[in-house]
Image (tube, rainbow, N blue to C red):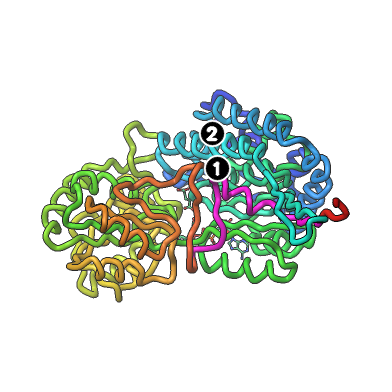
């Protein structure tokens, strides 16, 4: 371990992407109060020691963002767009290195990590284009002497807190929209995965994004940093992706200064297989929607409902397709499922599974860690006879466990699916066009995959209803969360 960084990073083409301190006002700052360790979940190796930042540094970052706001929001949309496109291009130029950093600190298969880098970058190019279409409106007024003008203006300083499961894309989905709108940005990444965030800061600097426009505050005192980001009156908008309980706390904190808020919180996604579904396609869709990132995604399938006439046939196909999935270190060729993020994740899944088995669920595949690989490698698992009363049905599993139940009628499938306080993503497979519209309208979810297991896309509005959150990210709607409407009554014209 030299220079606070593991020599594993010497395999990168550009090892200067690896930083170990917060990026504030265009500078990487050395910490005042020690360091925290970043580990590789695949083997537990120490990857880096990153400088601790806390409330003081969070305030400095907000000060830098507030100072940078007038000049950044004063650029033309085309000028901001050009800088964002340079940032985007640098991400693509360094896609493999960024993917390697991501896999090392987060664990997902390298190919999936490269996919995340492309996905994250796609928000930057999408919003670089959208920046040019932040159009206002002219509305006919009640008096002929008046015109009603509506302007869309950048809201101001945006603060964000992001999770470890998508250390690149969850930052860029927020930052790209914010910067495109003319806002400046401060993010606190998850303590488990700060290196991907700092690599983005390095590329922002190289892209000529001015000092103070994009800031990263790394630290383990999430509560203290969060207090600043949710309560400082200079922050106009707060955006969070993470668990529902933490989201509720942060939402309450934002009330003190009445900030505009976006919340991308947990889900409990159902996956319904109707009796007219294309079963092989449904199996492929389910594998994609379940095992992405080892099941650690808020849109991952949590509950599978299969209609009785196709239950046995579907299950046989599913077991055949799931059993050979390759569990391995994310850097190993052919890896399809990597390690879970930490021991707490393994413990949570084991507890949920044990409870379900005690209450009558049946284990058909997997069900434990693969100790030969290491303590965090959880086997792809299938359990059947799962009932709505079991905790595993009511909790975001965040792991590679498929919970299967049988149903008889369309109404029953809808009721089972909606039987949860959350409403993020849902999926169903069927071919009857009438049923497609009926079921899609009845599901209380922000996003629905019909005959499709992968629904995330920069052009689509990502977000949930009920306790899954507030607001939408991505798409042309995604810019609105970072703007304020200003109404100007233009009189004296007749
Ligand atoms: N919807 C989603 O995308 C996600 C859902 N989850 C769900 O949450 C479960 C637990 O995961 P976990 O990582 O603990 O998720 P958290 O919600 O705790 O963490 C997400 C982010 O919030 C930060 N944070 C945590 N507590 C506070 C606080 N009091 N004030 C300010 N910021 C805070 C974390 O910082 P730090 O890392 O420093 O603790 C991290 O940056 C998972 O098993 C999964 O079910 C988790 C992640 C993403
Ligand atoms: O779990 C999350 O919050 C990230 C969702 C990834 C995606 O955009 O599909």
Tell me the quarter of the picture where residue 6 sits.
top right
Q: Residues within 10 Å of mark 1 (few under 14, many from 20)?
A: many
Q: Residue at x 54, y 41 (%)?
A: 47
Disc 1: which residue = 168
One can see residue 4 in this view: no
Element under disc 2: helix
The image quadrant where one finds the N terminus is top right
* In front: label 1 or label 2: 1
Disc 2: which residue = 98
Say if the magenta span includes residue 334: no
State which region is magenta.
Answer: 468-489
Q: Position of residue 142 (x, y in %)?
A: 74, 61
Q: Which mark is residue 12?
A: none
Q: Position of residue 326 (x, y in %)?
A: 28, 41
In the rendered structure, the answer to whether residue 368 lies left or right of residue 376 reads left
Q: Which of the two residues, 294 or 393, is positioned nearer the viewer here?
A: 393
Q: Position of residue 256 (x, y in %)?
A: 73, 71
In the rendered structure, the answer to whether residue 333 lies left or right of residue 38 reads left
């Amino acid at each position: 371990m030299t220079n606070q960084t593991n020599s594993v990073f010497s395999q990168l083409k550009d090892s200067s992407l690896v930083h170990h301190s917060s990026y504030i006002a265009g500078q990487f700052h050395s910490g005042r109060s020690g360091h925290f360790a970043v580990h590789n979940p695949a083997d537990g190796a120490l990857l880096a020691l990153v400088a601790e930042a806390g409330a003081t540094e969070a305030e400095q970052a907000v000060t830098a963002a507030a100072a940078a706001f007038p000049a950044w929001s004063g650029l033309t949309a085309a000028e901001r767009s050009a800088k964002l496109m340079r940032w985007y291009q640098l991400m693509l130029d360094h896609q493999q290195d960024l993917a390697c950093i991501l896999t090392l600190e987060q664990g997902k298969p390298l190919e999936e990590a490269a996919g995340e880098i492309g996905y994250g970058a796609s928000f930057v190019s999408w919003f670089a284009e959208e920046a040019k279409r932040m159009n206002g409106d002219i509305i006919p007024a009640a008096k002929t002497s008046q015109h009603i003008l509506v302007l869309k203006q950048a809201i101001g300083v945006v603060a964000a807190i992001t999770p470890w499961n998508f250390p690149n894309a969850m930052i860029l989905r927020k930052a790209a929209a914010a910067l495109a709108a003319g806002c400046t940005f401060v993010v606190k990444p998850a303590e488990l995965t700060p290196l991907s965030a700092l690599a983005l800061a390095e590329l922002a600097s190289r892209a000529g994004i001015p000092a103070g426009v994009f800031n990263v505050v790394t630290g383990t005192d999430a509560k203290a940093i969060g207090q600043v980001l949710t309560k400082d009156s200079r922050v106009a908008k707060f955006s969070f992706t993470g668990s529902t309980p933490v989201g509720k706390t942060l939402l309450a904190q934002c009330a003190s200064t009445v900030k505009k808020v976006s919340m991308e919180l947990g889900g409990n996604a159902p996956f319904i297989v109707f009796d007219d579904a294309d079963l092989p396609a449904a199996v492929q869709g389910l594998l994609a929607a379940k095992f992405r990132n080892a099941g650690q995604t808020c849109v991952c399938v949590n509950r599978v409902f299969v209609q009785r006439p196709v239950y046995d046939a579907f299950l046989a196909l599913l077991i055949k397709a799931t059993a050979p999935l390759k569990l391995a270190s994310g850097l190993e060729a052919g890896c399809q499922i990597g390690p879970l993020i930490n021991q707490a994740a393994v413990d949570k899944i084991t507890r949920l599974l044990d409870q379900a088995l005690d209450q009558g669920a049946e284990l058909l595949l997997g069900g434990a860690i693969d100790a030969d690989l290491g303590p965090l490698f959880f086997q792809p698992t299938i359990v059947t006879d799962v009932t709505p009363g079991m905790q595993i049905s009511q909790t975001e599993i965040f792991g590679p466990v498929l919970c299967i139940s049988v149903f008889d009628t369309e109404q029953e499938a809808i009721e089972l699916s909606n039987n949860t306080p959350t409403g993020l993503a849902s999926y169903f497979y069927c071919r009857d066009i009438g049923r497609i519209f009926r079921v899609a309208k009845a599901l209380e979810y922000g996003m629905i995959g019909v005959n499709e297991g992968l629904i995330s896309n920069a052009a689509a509005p990502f977000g949930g209803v009920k306790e899954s959150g507030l607001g939408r990210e991505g798409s042309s709607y995604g810019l609105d969360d970072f703007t304020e409407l200003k109404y100007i009554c233009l009189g004296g014209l007749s």
